[in-house]
Amino acid sequence: MAQKIESLTRIEAHGQPPKIIEEFIGRVNSETQAVSIARMKSPAGWSEPGQTPEFDEYTVVLRGCLQVETRVGTLQIEAGQAVITNAGEWIRYSTPGEEGAEYIAVCLPAFSPATVHRDG
């Protein structure tokens, strides 16, 4: 049966200055283990620790620019672009530009603090 999601849940974010995470589907808001879908709003100058997650992440940038660092290089993902990161790959997200960024992140399986494996 179809399940209507009435509202989102704000989740505490890592990194500074704080970003906003609004989970629509996932372990917290809908008790969904298979996938998480969240809207992120990160301010100018935001960055978080690197991570080696156990999930694939599909990210679509709606506004601004998201910087994605990997072991082999750094990508600038602009509004209207997307990036795919794979489970087991070290990545670090940030929004160093003046505009910050707004983006949708889809994680398979769903994001979990226990499976993100943030750096120290």
Image (tube, rainbow, N blue to C red):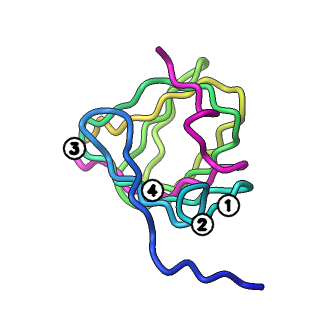
Which residue carries the number 3 mark?
Answer: 98
Q: Nearer the viewer, residue 19 or 95?
A: 19
Which residue carries the number 2 mark?
Answer: 30
Q: Which mark is residue 68?
A: none
The kind of residue tagged 3 is Glu
Which residue carries the number 1 mark?
Answer: 32
Q: Earlier in the sequence, mark 3 or mark 2?
A: 2
Q: CA distance from mark 3 to mark 4?
A: 16 Å
Name the element at disc 2: loop
Name the element at disc 4: strand
> Which image quadrant is residue 46 in?
top left
Query: Residue 28, position in %: x, y?
Result: 54, 57
Residue plotted at (74% across, 55% down): 34
Query: Residue 65, position in %: x, y?
Result: 38, 47
Q: Which residues are magenta?
A: 98-120
Residues at badges 3 and 2 in contact (C-beta under 8 Å)? no
Q: Which mark is residue 103?
A: 4
Residues at badges 2 and 4 in contact (C-beta under 8 Å)? no
